Amino acid sequence: MLAALMYCMVTPSKSRWRRILIDALAVFGVFKILVMFLLLNFLIFFPPSDRVMPILQLLLFLPSLLLIWGWIYWRMDIRYIARNGKRMFLFRMSADDSPGPYDYVLASFTSLISSTLGGFTGDTRTARTLILLHGLMMWDIMGLSLSRAISLVAFSSK
């Protein structure tokens, strides 16, 4: 994996192999995030002996989850534009601006501090479903964090 990242750093940014390699690494990241998401949810049924570890895992997992969702939004939109000629996700921007990868990651991180993704909506059913899945995962992680924090406080007060 490190060799693939080094290759991406030295090849031109418009290279087809670089894009394929980055997409392959991101798909690997998506599968890794899904497995970690399931394992974090299973910790409810099998609590570890260390009470601090689960909340630390959740806090360290959150940025990875948000980055992956930003990549998913960006890649799905780019693919949809190539096929249909229009955007899958709509941004509230001036007509001259077109969103870049940063805007998709920013929309993903905005979901952490806001209950709605203001200025970012789905134009297709698939886009709205992706936004819904992202929201459900975020609420799940927030609920797990809250329950772990309460468990930590309750255990330390005994």
Image (cartoon, rainbow, N blue to C red):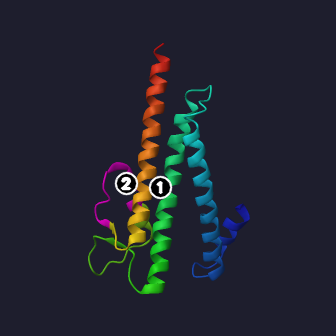
Q: Does the magenta run of residues contain 111?
A: yes
The numbered mark at residue 113 is: none
Rendering quarter of residue 149? top left
Work out whether 21 lies above or below 34.
below
Q: Nearer the viewer, residue 35 or 58?
A: 35
Residue beneath disc 1: 66
Image location of residue 56, percent across then percent down: 54, 37
Numbered disc 2: secondary structure? helix
Residue found 45% across the figure and 20% down from its top = 154
Q: At label 2, which amino acid type do we have?
A: Ser
Name the residue furthest top.
158
Q: Is residue 140 above or below residue 134?
A: above
Residue at 48% x, 85% y: name it. 82
Residue at 61% across / 32% down in the picture?
A: 46
Residue 8 in percent (x, y) is at: 65, 71
Q: Position of residue 152 (x, y in %)?
A: 49, 25
Q: Quadrant of the N terminus?
A: bottom right
Near mark 1 (Cα within 10 A), the count class, few <14, some 14-19 or many ≥20, is: many
Identify which amino acid the numbered label 1 is placed on: Leu
11 to 115, vertically: above or below? below
Left/right of residue 97 with respect to residue 133 in the rendered view: left
How many C-alpha atoms fall within 10 Å of the one at disc 2: few (<14), some, or many (≥20)?
some
Q: Position of residue 77 (x, y in %)?
A: 44, 75
The segment highlighted magenta reads 106-120
- In the picture of the structure, the residue carrying the numbered disc 2 is 111
- Above or below, 43 against 86 in this view is above
Kindly state the secondary structure of the residue where label 1 is placed.
Answer: helix
**Between marks 2 and 1, how big is the CA–CA gap?**
9 Å
Cβ atoms under marks 2 and 1 closer than 8 Å: yes
